[in-house]
Image: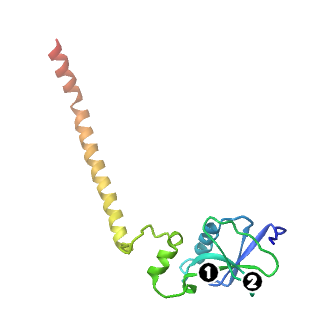
Amino acid sequence: MVDDTSPFLEVFCEVSGKDYRFTTGTKAEFAVSVINRKLGSLKPRVIYIEAAKEGEEPISFGDNASLLNYGLGWKLKTVVDADLPGTEKNNRQQRFSSVFSTGFANDSTPEIGEQSLKYIGRIFFAFVLMFILGGLFTVALENLPRLILLFNNSFV
């Protein structure tokens, strides 16, 4: 039985020890991102939210699921990556690829420094290309009067 009497619901975060309030119907993906943002650089990270009750099987909320209060005794809480069985990071990434949002699906994920160098290189290339095109247009505009005179003289 779902309890809709409260205008908000609370999600307990085990990492920070705090309750975070959200409106009923908030998407679980949004709630996870807000909690992770508020945690800052604290590790481990929240990966999903579940409803738990003593003696009952927990109910996990997927990314697009709306958060609900299931009533008396049910409590919404976060699940962090340290809570998952097994210690291999690659297994967690394959099982929960949508919440890790690394942007890469395979194991050959570039390091942060490599991504930064590629980004800086692309910016540098864009500036060089911009200056080359600017120079070409400048030369063309400086010679435009001569080109117009050449065409006028050839048709007369």
> Which residue shows up at 74% across the image and 70% down it?
68
* Residue position for label 1: 79
Provide the secondary structure element on which disc 1 rests: strand
The quarter holding residue 53 reads bottom right
Q: Left or right? Give the position of 150 relative to 27.
A: left
Image quadrant containing the N terminus: bottom right
135 or 84: nearer the eye?
84
Which residue is outermost to the left?
154
Q: Residues within 10 Å of mark 1 (few under 14, many from 20)?
A: many
Point out the tag, 1 or 2, that comes first from the N-terminus: 2
> Which residue shows up at 26% across the image and 33% down it?
141
17 or 1: nearer the eye?
1
Looking at the rendered structure, the kind of residue marked 1 is Val
Provide the secondary structure element on which disc 2 rests: loop
Q: Position of residue 92 (x, y in %)?
A: 49, 79
Looking at the rendered structure, the kind of residue marked 2 is Lys
Q: Position of residue 21 (x, y in %)?
A: 72, 72
Marks 1/2: CA–CA distance: 14 Å
Q: Position of residue 113 (x, y in %)?
A: 36, 73
* Residue position for label 2: 53
On screen, 15 above or below 1? Answer: below
On screen, 80 above or below 137? Answer: below
